[in-house]
Amino acid sequence: MVRHMDILAEEMLKIRSRDPARYKRLIQEGMLAELGFDVGIKTKAQASVDEVKAKFRPKDPSYAAISDSVIAGKRARTKELVATSLQQGKDPVDLVTNALMPGIQTQCELYDLGKAFVPEILMSNDAMQGGIELCQAQLGDIPKKGKLATFVAEGDLHDIGKNIVAAILRANGFDVIDLGRDVPTAKVIETTKAQGIQMVSGSTLMSTTKAGLKSTAETLEEEGLKVPLACGGAAVSRAFVDTFVNSIYGKSPLDAVKIATEVCEGKDWKEVRKDLY
Ligand code: B12
């Protein structure tokens, strides 16, 4: 029995360095907590609402007010606060990343802990989108660095992260066609051909829908389009993405920007992996 636990602990340590998101999820699902290990991560029962809020709360008071307003799901108030910050000269990309995103991250973690519910998530998402729209409008028409498509894998309705990635890519000068969520591979291929897409960004949050990213990357390759797939989202790990061709793993929206920049400069997926991993 002890031997088995040792093997499990060793395996968990490997997962922790290779794929922290999966490690955290396994812990949250209680696998080790049930065995009584001190894993250094609070379980669902332990983390309080205040602790979760404190974890993501921006230090800048005006950013904290925006984040709080997103958590409260107040679209009009969020827009008002974002408009004031923009008038005061705050950078729109910084506002998306460091004021709006912490709000939705807090709400998502609270939901995961059973301390927020579906309507609250959707209202927070709506409030965040209101703020994002103002930030995008402020950026105006900047010369485009390349043409991209974003989508969420077939069967998956989680689109909050994909929306953030699309917003950050646009804010960094890319022309982005957003195909939405629950998108079949065939739709991605069709758009890529018809619109002259240079890179596709795919997201997924469920283990059951990860295969959609693999099939999309492989089909893009089989069709000879030379269009790589940047892959991300909480269910996706680098270890998984490295099992198929024509794909590059990224963790954050800024990774998506780095990948898109290299691809639109003419690098292929193998070169981008070498540069960014
Ligand atoms: C919000 C949420 C929902 C909302 C979704 C609303 C919406 N419009 O998106 C609602 C309530 C509808 C929902 C429904 C369900 N959900 Co849900 N949901 C979540 C929750 C709490 C947060 C997800 C989220 O938005 N995170 C925040 C965003 C910002 O993070 P993100 O998407 O990962 O994106 C970031 C990065 O990954 C990165 N990124 C994203 N894409 C890309 C792409 C590239 C190229 C790069 C570089 C980076 C990148 O940038 C983003 C910003 O930092 C998670 C739990 C959690 N805490 O993660 C569960 C979770 C994802 N849901 C889960 C499940 C099971 C479901 C349901 C099946 C529940 C049910 N039984 O009905 C349904 C799914 C229905 C379906 N067919 O899709 C599971 C999935 C388990 C698994 N691993 O398979 C989770 C993990 C909860 C859990 N612990 O069990 N859910």
Image (cartoon, rainbow, N blue to C red):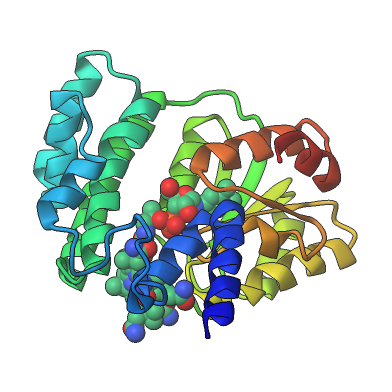
Left or right of residue 74, residue 206 in this image: right
Is residue 221 depicted above or below 82 in this figure?
below
**Circle count:** 0
Tell which of 73 and 52 is nearer to you: 52
- Residue 194 appears at what percent x and percent y? 73, 58
Picture layout, residue 16 above or below residue 205: above
Q: Is 222 in front, or is 236? A: 236
Q: In this view of the protein, can residue 157 be seen by the observer?
A: no
Ligand 1: give its quadrant: bottom left
Choose between 3 and 232: the one closer to the eye.
3
In the picture provided, is 270 more to the left or to the right than 77?
A: right
Place of residue 69 in the rendered image (x, y in percent of width and height, measured from the top left): 12, 43
In percent of the image, x 38 and y 77: which residue is there? 35
Q: Residue at x 21, y 17 (%)?
A: 87
Quadrant occupied by the C terminus:
top right
Query: Is 237 on the left or on the right of 166, as rendered?
Result: right
Whether residue 241 is visible here, answered yes or no, is: yes
Quarter of the rendering containing residue 60: top left
